[in-house]
Structures are given as structure tokens and as C-alpha cells.
Image: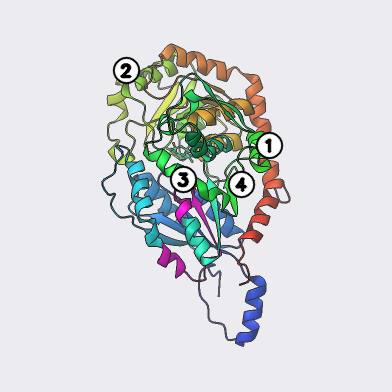
Amino acid sequence: MGNLPFGSLCLDNRPKKKKKKINAKMAQPHVALFPCTGMGSLIPFLRLAANLAARGCNVTVITLHPTVSAAESDQISNFFSLHPHIKRLQFQPLSPENSKFLIGDPFFLQVQAISNSVHLLDPILAALSPPLSAIISDLQVAGSMCRFASQKSISAYVLATTSAMYFSLMAIFPKLTLQKGGGKFQANTHLELPGLGAVPVSSIPVPMLNSNTFLSELLDANIPCLSKVKAILINSCADLESETIEALNSGRAIPDLAPVLAIGPLQSFEDDKAPNLPWLDEQAPESVLFVSFGSRTALPIGQILELRDGLEKSGCKFLWVLKTNRVDKDDKEDVETILGESFLERTKEQGLVVKGWVNQDQILAHPAIGGFLSHCGWNSVTEAARLGVPILAWPLFGDQKLNAKVVEKAGIGLWADWGWCGDVLVAGDDIAKKISELTTNEKIRVRAKEVKEKIGQARESGGDLDVLLGGLIDQLKPTEK
Ligand code: UDP
């Protein structure tokens, strides 16, 4: 019969009674995973899906159609061609209704469209075969998924795709806003989070500081289910943020929170391959700074030019993924036009600038990479941590400042606190100085390697993470009704 995919049907002539008994004994979970918009959510969900399937689960992944970025759609196609036994359920949200909020970001617009139409998934999920035993969703749709799960008496889980630190802030925020009467918070002050310590107001994303924003409304709608889900899976680990994870699980930080299982860093679902970049192959070990600000962040053009100057002045070898538009489909200008031919000519030995999608995980694993100038999207942080690459954190939006705080506290990088993106123009000289601070910091280099090793040990058979994931599979199994 060859290798049948897990989801395939096959004819079985054995007497029905016997078959039933075997099925009941060997019942495997059928889990639906529901990522939200953007690569930052999609990638960890696909990684978890591959991991659960490799451990024998039936897995269905709900994918959005159409996706905002071309990268999401490519990633989805690649994933299903590598994992034909994982089922795909395409979901096309209704077009967004007129919103009371001004939403300029196409990724947030899609989140809103999903929030408005997620109920349409109920009958489709209810009809899946074999019946679902659990659903794991992004926090942004967790309220609806939790409601569905409770109606069907199955388990609901949330996969948090950010740091435990930022997750804590989100989880506590509706309560804090309530305490403050929905008012604004004072700049230049700290918020004392129970069990978590002081968080500077300047590190909290601006839309969270105002109760009349889409983000605040989204949190208000979804945070209450965090006490109802069976567990919160978080793409983090004790080597990065043990205190926060412990505080969350002790009930000190947020009362009534479901157990938090730190199942990270989630590993790539692709084979380890070298990136197809001959320039990188020629460079000395750990000599190159990888520069990338993730999948949906484009620096303003003036800042791109300062970064260009800073990289050149630092004298450090660099591999820079240049992005000039939030959505990749609209990112059309070529490198020469943006950076100038003379710069490219002068730095042709020192660096390589690329545009478009690269496989970041493969690049970070390359022996020539010795540092990562990153916006600190949480996936980027976990990838660098897993691969032992020191980080120069330049957070720009959203959760990134708190993620940068985690990087600094874990000792695997430096944080250049230059405000939110666009607040100030960071000069090339300052960027060059920070780069050399990172590249000459032996302590961080050693610590990054140590964290890599510990993460590797946890993943090994019988390691902490392996055991945790095994326990999770048991939890996901269908309960007898
Ligand atoms: N990524 C990549 N190639 C790119 C840009 C991004 O592989 O050219 C991946 C990166 O490895 C990470 C994800 O996209 O897994 C981006 O997620 P992150 O949380 O770091 O940042 P976001 O893009 O959500 O801001």
C-alpha cells in the first residue's frame, strides 16, 4: 500500500466490532490550527502543525484566502507540498465592514475582516472528519474558537506567538485599562505588573494606551477566554524568560489564567538546507551581520539611508534584506534606485543587499553569520536564540520593545532604544557604534551559544521540550463522551 498519508481513507474488511476496539485504543487527536494574518502568526502555526503531525496527530490547518502578502501564500503552498498528510481548510473572510476605527494597515484590516466573519467557520469545523478533538488558535480569534469548542465539548488552546513578557501585558491589559477608567497612561512612567515587575509606558505599543483603538477592542474581546482555554501554548522557553513563565503559571501575574506551556522555540518545518547565497559562502565564520526587519516592517526612506551609511561606517560585513513597503506585492523599487550605485560599488566586498523573501532561518544557521540586527519580531528572536546568533535589537512597533527587553535580559543581545519607528531619525554614526558594540561583545557571543546548546538539549529525545510535547499530544486526544 506504500506510505499512506495520515488523512487518507482506506478500506478495511475486518469485522466492525474489532475495528472499533482498535480505534478507541489508538485514537489519535484531530487538531485544527487557526493562525491569523501575517507571517508572524502563520510561521509558528505551520511549525507547530508539522510537529504535531510528526507525532501522529491528524492535523487540519485553516488558511486565509486571499492572503495579504505574497510571502504568506508562497509559504502555505510550500508547507502543504512538504506535508501532504496535513489537511488544509481555506477560509475566505467577508470583506471588512465600515469600521469605526481608522485602519490603514492591510494586515489589521484583514484581522478585522476575520473577527467579523469567524462565526462562518462553525458549521465547517463541526463537519470535519474525523471529528475535531481540539482547536489551537491565534489569540486574535481565540474568543470565537473558545465559544465553538465549548459548544462542541472539545478543548480549545491558544498559541501565543509573542514573548511571554508581551503576552503577560496583553493578558493583564483590559483589567489595567478598566482600573484607569479607560483613560490614557502617563508617558515617562512605569506600570507595575503583578509578578512581572515594572514595564515602562514607553515600551507599550501606542494603540494599547488608548481604549478606543482596534487593538484595545480586540484584546477586550479575546482576553477573557484565557481563563477558559485548556492551556496557553507559548513559542518561548525557560532559557529566554523563565521568571515570566513561572510568574504566569504561579497565578501571581494574572489570576485564573490557564496553564502556560512553553513549547518554543518552534523549529522550521523545512529541511536544514544552506541558503543559495554564494557571497555568504565565501565569508569567514561569524563575520557577517544579518540585517532584517521581518516580513511587514519597512523603515522610512530617510532611515534606510542612515542605516546604509551606518553599515558602511561600521566596517562590518553585512547581509541586508531591504524592504521599502509593508506589503511585499507593492515593494517594487530596486536596490540601486534606493541605495545608489556608488554605495553598492564601494561596498561590494563588504556586503550584500537583497530584496524579496529570503529564508531567514537558513541564513541565521549559516556559519558565516555572527550577528543579527533585528526589529525583534518574536519569531526572529526565537530563531536567533535557537541558532546561537547574538542580536542587536532595534525594536520599531508593537511587541518589539518588550521582546527586546527579553533579549537583553537573557543576555543574548543588546538593545538600541531609539524610540518607536519614525519618532526620531537615528544617525548612521549611532548605528555604526552600536554594531561594533555588538560585534566586540564576547560575553553576549558566549551566552548566545550557551542558550543555543540548552535549547538543543531540551529538544532531544527525553529532553524537557520533547517530554512537554509528548504530554501535550496526550491532552489533545479525544475524550470519551
Ligand atoms: N522571514 C523570512 N524571510 C524574510 C522575512 C521574514 O524567513 O525575508 C520570516 C522570519 O524568519 C520569521 C517571520 O518571517 O519567521 C517573521 O516573523 P517575526 O515575528 O520575526 O516578525 P514580523 O514579520 O511578524 O514582524
Q: State which tag comes first along the sequence, 3 or 1.
A: 3
Q: Which residue is at the far right?
A: 462
Q: Which residue is mark 1?
A: 453
Q: Which residue is mark 4?
A: 256
Q: CA distance from mark 2 to mark 3?
A: 38 Å
Q: State which tag comes first along the sequence, 4 or 1.
A: 4
Rendered location of residue 234, percent (x, y)? 58, 44
Q: CA distance from mark 4 to mark 1?
A: 34 Å
Q: State which tag comes first along the sequence, 4 or 2.
A: 4
Q: Which residue is mark 3?
A: 41
Neighbours of disc 4 within 10 Å: few (<14), some (14-19), many (20+):
some
In the image, 400 versus 255, the foreground residue is 255
Neighbours of disc 3 within 10 Å: few (<14), some (14-19), many (20+):
many
Foreground label between 3 and 1: 3
Q: CA distance from mark 3 to mark 1?
A: 26 Å
Relative to residue 165, is residue 306 depicted above or below?
above
| Three-letter amino acid code at the position of disc 2 | Ser
| Three-letter amino acid code at the position of disc 1 | Glu
| Three-letter amino acid code at the position of disc 4 | Asp
Residue at horizontal 38%, vertical 51%?
115
Relative to residue 258, is residue 292 depicted above or below?
above
Count up the numbered dots. Answer: 4
